[in-house]
Image: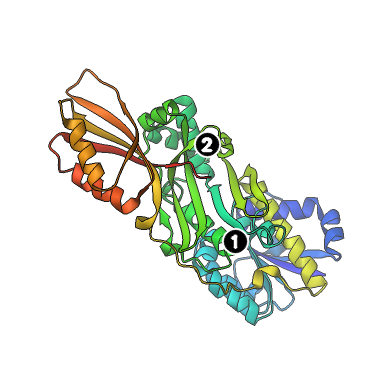
Amino acid sequence: MIKIGLLGLGTVGSGVYKIINDNRESIEQKVGTELKIEKILVSDTNKKRSVEINKELLTDQAENILENPEIDLVVELIGGEEPAYSYVKKAIDNNKSVITANKLIIAKHGSEILKAANQNNVQISFEGSVAGGIPIIRPLKESLVASNINNIYGILNGTTNYILTKMTEEKKEFKEVLKEAQELGYAESDPTSDISGLDAAYKIAILSSITFETYVNINSVYSEGIEDITLTDIKVADELGYVIKLLAIAKKQNEGIDIRVHPAFISKKHPLALVNGVYNAIYLNGEIVGDIMSYGKGAGQMPTGSAVVADIIQTAKDIHYNRPNIYSNESTLKHMVIDIDEIKNLFYLRVLVNDKPGVMSEVTEILGNNQVSLASVLQKHRLSPVVPLDLVTHPVREENLNNSLKELKTLNNVKSIESVIRVIEDF
């Protein structure tokens, strides 16, 4: 028998409990032995639950799980950094295997957690920490290990993808759609982590660490959110044959890893352009396997619960048959994260200028002096003394582009730089 302690009985915790109870017979056949949920940590043992549960299983004292010698496997589903990280470390130090869906602690403390798991000869699994119900971490460790994956492009945050989809389809501004998303429960009351790109940054850091067999410090991951994306940007993208998505990107280069999160124009013809609503997708390119895309719901009670239960089944099976865990291997390779200033991208620029002769030449002179060449220029005249210039550059170093923008802002005829959005065409 494998005894389990659950830390948390919120949305995902309730889903995990329900999946195990409703599918106990088939799960135990897969594991090869009986599973028993021994204790569940909650903040309030008297609170009414969305699932029927024996109150004797509940405890508000973490020690009743972390220090219980009968519990073999701890499942951390409380989220956040603390006390989750401390609970995970204590469980490992007490020789318990751990499963978590906590992207934050894996992204920030993964190296320490894996080291502790190795030292204590226990297992750590975290499939649910990235892309909910989409199987990606175990495939990267197992099925794709010989494929030499070099590029990862992901839509890894359902909230931002929902917002951008609604802006595109219903021609609504960001703030209006964000409010709708909060009312529907797709966005938190404080949506900062999602819309700033930080949530996606945690996830791409985890995927990069696994794929490139290295430790990626979350503080080295450049992230930019969707707060400044306007309906005008959406419309211009459409006119130029693109859609806007919040992309998480990781590419192995000779000089290091190019890893970043930001909004981007991507061609309507690319498979990622068709990923809409709250769905996530991960697009991989490998030297041997070529292109692969995984698609599905990236969050929610059952998608994430499914990933967690899959980890429970595999980990319980490994414990039962005394097999080592593939996730407990520490990364030994070292890769430098390339500074964002050194990365080359195409850019879409929207610049508001005075409608006067010679203004365009002033703009192009500054761009040219900074080695920024233009691929296309779209100028739409308005009944106003100020007109927009919609520009798309050829590939340019970010530092050169930023130097150009600083100089453009000093021109009297440049009223404002409304938008700066990367264009991704090198999938």
Mark 2: secondary structure: helix
Task: Indicate the position of residue 270 as horizontal and vertical percent values.
Answer: 56, 36
Report if residue 224 is visible in the image.
no
Q: Is residue 233 left or right of residue 310?
A: left
Q: Residue furthest top?
A: 383
- In the image, residue 232 above or below residue 94: above
Q: Which residue lies under the disc numbered 2?
A: 184
Image quadrant holding the N terminus, namely bottom right
- In the image, residue 174 above or below residue 84: above
Q: Closer to us: mark 2 or mark 1?
A: 1
Residue 420 is labelled as: none
Residue 211 is labelled as: 1
Task: Indicate the position of residue 362 as horizontal and vertical percent values.
Answer: 18, 36
* Residue type highlighted by circle 1: Thr
What coloring was used for the rendering?
rainbow
Q: For the residues marked 2 and 1, what is the alpha-carbon distance in whole angstroms?
A: 35 Å
- State the image quarter where residue 4 is shown: bottom right
- In the image, residue 291 above or below residue 338: above
323, 394: nearer the viewer: 394
Mark 1: secondary structure: helix
Graded by Cα atoms within 10 Å as few (under 14), some (14 to 19) or many (20 or more), the crowding at tag 2 reads few
Q: Residue furthest left?
A: 412
395, 1: nearer the viewer: 395
Residue at 23% x, 37% y is 364
Report if residue 381 is visible in the image.
yes
Task: Indicate the position of residue 273 as horizontal and vertical percent values.
Answer: 54, 36
288, 261: nearer the viewer: 288
* Residue type highlighted by circle 2: Leu
- State the image quarter where residue 348 is shown: top left
Residue at 40% x, 47% y is 345
